[in-house]
Image (cartoon, rainbow, N blue to C red):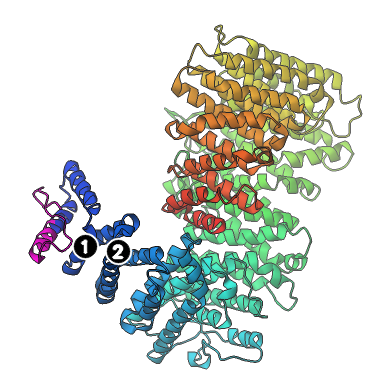
Amino acid sequence: MMNGSGSVVGGSGGGDGGNAEIEAQLMGLESVVEELAYPQITPERKELIERELQNFKDQPHAWYLASAFMSMSTNSMVLFYSATVLEHTVHNTWSQLGADERDQVKAFLVDFLESNFTDLKHFVRNKALQVFIAIGQAEWRDYFPRFLDIIKEWCMRPDTLALGLTAVKMLSEECSLSPATRLSDSVLHRMPEFLDIVLSVLKAILHEARTFGDIGVLSGKKAGQSSPVHAPRSSPADDMLGSALQPQSGSGNLHFNTRNLEHTVIALEAIGHFFSWCPLSKLLTEEVVMVLRDFTFIHQPDSRIGCKALRCFNEIHAQRFIPPSFGGYIQLVFELTLQLLNEALQGMETNASFNQSLDEQYLDALVEYLRLFVINYLPRLAADPNISLASAVFNIMRLADQLPAHLFLEAMDVLNELIDLLLEDASNTLAGLRESCREVLVQIAERITDKMQLTKTEMMTELDYRQEKDAEPSEYDQCIDKCAHFVSGATRLYQQDVLSILGKQFMDKLGVIFTGCSKTTTTPEGPRIEFAVEEDMVYFHYACRDLSAMCKMLAMVADVFAAQFENYAAMGKEMLDMSLNVLFSILSAGLHNAHDFIADPLCVQLLVSVEALCPWLRECTKAAIAGTGINIEVLNGIVSQILSAIGQTMETAVAPTLRTAACSLFAVLTSTIKTPIVRQADEYAPLVSMLLENMAPLDSETQILIVSGVSSALVVQWDGASAQEQLWDERTSQLKELVTYASGPLQESLAGGAAPGNFVQACSIMTGICRSFRSERTPAMKQSLPEVQKAIEAAMENLLSFTALDKEESLEAARGFVGLVKEMITAVGSSLPPRWVQQLISNMSFRSLSCCTSRPLLEELLAEFLDCIAHSIRFYEDRLGETLHHITQLISTLAPAILSMSISLQRSFADTVAALLTTRAIRKLEEHIPDLAKSLAACGCTGDLVLLDTMLDAVELLVRQQSEVLLPEVVPFFVESLTKMQDQQTRAQRITAALSQLT
């Protein structure tokens, strides 16, 4: 051991030296662990100390000195380090110790824990207890038959109760992670016994708390009128319901001393963990449910009590377990849910101190409880005509209304689960629930459309709207997405009721913005919207963001709005007119190019709103052709206005996002309005010429949108037109000209000096053409498809021959080509000859490794090709035939060194492996399953969240499919990888669930 001056002290230990020598070594250890905590310590010194401390663990008699240090020192860091030395011994050299020495360590730990547990800091006592449990795992049952009895005895003694309860919880955690051991089998067998012990502790504590405290309930009755534990009865279900109707609500003046508080929390944590991995059929009794129910309402003096009890119920609900012997269990859960909601609402709405007593963990557990209740019990309860669920649903929204912003996000998950249940009710078993909740759900939809607006609620301003690159959506965006999901779902259920609300909100926001845009001023930097005071500017900015949210919801229900076009003809036209008027007002004033922080994104949202109204416009056009609805001349005028808005935006806009939005509207308009009305508009031909002639400087996605729009006008089948009126010969000829135009640069030799930029642009044009093929298999598409195939063949040969230059341009060329192939497969994959596709992907697999001599560039190119291959696997699955073996050869070549390659290649590699494992492709690759699983697991535990998500997605899908991929020799790969990643807090819940399902 090394002392503070850097010298090494200590020797063999083992009893040869006296106490004086051990004390000297202890002083040296205390000195260096304290030095490690000094802020001024140098990295070199810290590394030296840590290396010496690690080396000490490998000394033959380190266990003896560690035991001596623990018995002599009161320094927490020394105690913790000494416990890690013992842990190292148990895991690495335990079998080398003699039987007497092992017994000596066990006896020491038992005595140390019993004598010191309550006085030790948590991290020390937990580590010492981990060592004890590790010994039990290693020696059970032959060499340590009293292991479980010792823990049981701790639970039976008042002075070691905290030790016993903690040991039971940690034992459960250890056994759940290693379920295939002798100890785990024994613990599982004796789990009802341990549960009874823990439950008796909770009952005794509750009795003591009631004895010293006057428990008030919401009804004003004394808690003594209802007992938490009931004697056997002739009708358990009836008695449970009777008890449920007179709950132990509220903690009132419950008296918990510090000791009982600690014991209660540990005991509830232990029960929750029992439920997470042990068969509930062995554990869940009426008595257990009743005791847990009483604890769910206790959140004073410490809300952890109610929180832990709720989490116990959440474990039961998550497993969808209903005790077969409890005839009224579902009704009991319903009554408990009503009580929890009512108590929380009454307290939060009337009592500020009550609000403070509910910490976020309790509220989080309550919201999760409600989510599981909706998923698992609501459909069953809906079948009972005597139960009214509308009030429970409404109270969930009332609770959400009271929650802080970040918890409101979680409460929206509850409401969205409900709306999804009603929408996915294919058998119509929830028809009664849909009708009984109509008024409530429409009210909730209206409240949510208010709640999600910055101009109407302060809550939205509390959410962070910033988003890091490649990160998850911001809090604000998540909230908008969840609110929009609910409102769009409610719109599909109750179309006219909710559409009226949404339309009014949309028009209100447009009115605010139109008024604001009419007040402009000229500055040296350009025109600006003029605001009298800063508050007006903030309000206008909020209104613009609220409009964005309204546009998102409008886009999600565009088909519903279109189906209701007869009822909303006037509203739809007014919404279109107002959106275009505001847009023209901004464009005419030049606000969008004055770098105004509002105008550019506002114009984008206005274009999005018009795009969302295109399906409605199509239905109106079909009706007009049939001689009903809006006059055809009026519709011609609307289309002309839209085309003019697109043209004016493209002519004057500076911001790339604005130009992309305009081109997106153009693509949607030509693919949605399936009549000649668009092509016949006076503005159409000049707009197309301008777009095609000026698209070279634009980004790839914008180019694709332009060509997709032009091509769609040539491909779509016009509504109500005869074969002759379709003008297929004329339109097919124009489409072939466009294909020929794009094919030229794809065939010009890149290796021979052709400009890669022309190749990339040609890929974008061809991608746009393929995108227009998505909707229909029309004569124009069918006759042009062979020419597109030839162009792709030539492009791939050209690209894979582009080896000598090794320039960054080749990466852009590869991305353009991969995007083209993926779009073609998505759009017309089922129309392509299987042999052609197999040859294309096999060629890509065989030649991609040799397409470049620069290692960094090769890795990026491979990432692009693998991305394309993964897309193909998911589309064609086992139809790729022998090509799957070619892909597997490429994977096998990359696998040994994949973790040393670029992160983009690792991600594409993992995605390709996941595609092979989770589709029918794996049927042809059974002999490769272990190697593929091992490769995916290795990528999943590198620390990169994208790779972790790829592995988690694959594992979750395999479990749902009950896939034959999850062989006994494969599961350990995933378990080991997921176990390494358990410290990833943002994925902890998914990882825990995946581990539970795998084991």
Mark 2: amino acid: Phe
Where does label 2 land, which residue?
123
In the picture, residue 433 is in which quadrant? bottom right
Residue 687 horizontal/vertical position (percent): 68, 22
Q: Which residues are magenta?
A: 1-28
Which type of secondary structure does the marked residue at label 1 adopt?
helix
Q: How many marks?
A: 2
Q: Amino acid at mark 1?
A: Tyr
Residue 23 painted magenta:
yes
Where's residue 762, x and y in %?
63, 17
Q: Secondary structure at mark 2?
A: helix
The answer to which quarter of the image holds residue 773 is top right
Q: Nearer the viewer, residue 126 or 566?
A: 126
Looking at the image, is 395 positioned above or below residue 30?
Answer: below
* Residue drawn where x is 65% and y is 78% of the image: 331
Mark 1 and mark 2 lie on one chain; the one further toward the N terminus is 1
221 sits left or right of 572 in the view: left
Residue 546 in view (yes/no): no
Assign the magenta stretch its main secondary structure: loop
Q: Residue at x 72, y 20 (%)?
A: 789
- Look at mark 1 in the image and give the residue it sits on: 64
Is residue 11 shown in magenta?
A: yes
